[in-house]
Image (cartoon, rainbow, N blue to C red):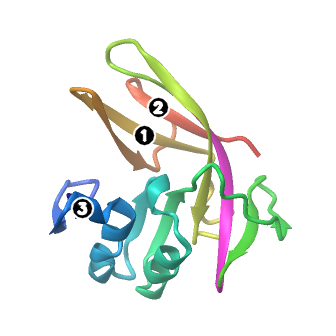
Amino acid sequence: MLMTLCETGTRGLIGAFFGPASKGEPDYAHDPVGHLTSDMLLLADRAFDSNRLLVDIAAQGAQFLIRATTVRRPPVLALLPDGSYLTRIGDLSLRVIEAEVRSRTADGGAFGGTYRLLTTLTDPSSDPPTTWCISTTSVGRSRSHTWRSVTPCSRGESCVRRTR
């Protein structure tokens, strides 16, 4: 198993962690946390939304935007003007953004769905999710997603638009 922490703009490798596959991705996710700094925004997929990991990331001072698992339904504590809402997970105050993601792949296929995003960026006026883009590349049977805050989406990219 290999877990990496990479910079999305330059694709620079910040850290790499190896071990047996029996440990699993969620357990390896804690290994790179010590390399996070307060000027970083961590982007992660749904396998990385455990309460302990969220707390550990925030304790490093880093911000995060993480797609939640479909079973995670955090309570709505306050609705925000942009349709997102505030919640608490443990001692963390978080913002939840429900977003519709639709994409076309290079081979003409399509995929997408509704996603729940958890973030420490709690102010919608300074961090609006009006449109975020995902650069998608396919390598063999796997897909790679890079989340960027670019408006508007350009050709060949997936658009993420908030649904609430």
Kind of residue sitting beneath label 3: Met
Q: Which residue is mark 1?
A: 134
x, y percent for residue 40: 37, 72
How far is disc 2 from disc 1 in space, using C-alphas? Answer: 5 Å
Q: Quadrant of the N terminus?
A: bottom left
Nearest to viewer (mark 1 / mark 3): 3
Q: Residue 153 placed where, x, y %?
A: 48, 33
Name which of mark 2 and mark 1 comes first in the sequence: 1
Q: Is residue 57 visible?
A: yes
Residue 121: image x %, image y %? 58, 69
The residue singled out by tag 3 in the image is 3
Asked whether disc 2 touches disc 1, contact meaning CB atoms under 8 Å apart, the reply is yes
- Who's the residue at 44% across and 84% down the image? 61
Residue 97, compared with residue 144, is above or below; it is below
- Tell me if residue 155 is in the magenta stretch: no
Q: Look at label 2 and name its amino acid.
A: Ser
At 74% across and 56% down in the image, what residue appears?
84
Residue 99 covered by magenta stretch:
yes
- The reply, left or right, for residue 73 in relation to residue 53 is right
User: Helix or strand or loop: what does disc 1 sit on?
Assistant: strand
